[in-house]
Amino acid sequence: MTAAANAKKKLRVVQTRSVIGQAHPMRLTIKGLGLKGPGSSSVVDNTPSFRGAIKKVLHLVRVEEVDAKS
């Protein structure tokens, strides 16, 4: 995938599980992704920093790639 094609894509992150019982850094990561509780979603850029944050809490979220227009 080229850099231009990657720049057009964004990631929709949907929180599927609660942060109750999770470590404090995971709670902060969820908050940093713009999520507020199970069922909430946000659209973030497809950058290495956001992908790393998502990887840290992958067991709590669902991720899908969307076009930048969405």
Image: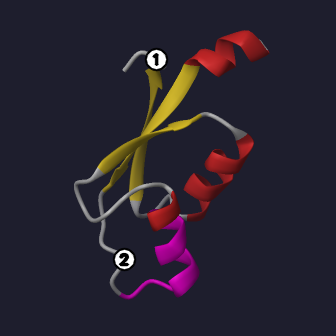
- Residue 56, percent across and down? 60, 63
User: Quick one: SS at disc 1?
Assistant: strand
Q: CA distance from mark 2 to mark 1?
A: 28 Å
In the image, residue 27 lies in the stretch drawn in magenta: yes
Task: Return the x and y of residue 30 as percentages of the image width and height.
Answer: 46, 65
**Residue 14 vertical placement versus 12 (above, below):** below
Tally of numbered tags: 2
Task: Quadrant for residue 29, please give it.
Answer: bottom right
Q: Residue at x 36, y 21 (%)?
A: 70
Asked whether 70 or 38 is in front, the reply is: 70
* Dominant SS in magenta: helix
- Determine if residue 61 is in view: yes
Figure check: 62 above or below 8: below
Q: Give the magenta part as a residue range.
A: 21-30
The dot on residue 67 is: 1
* Figure quadrant of the N terminus: top right
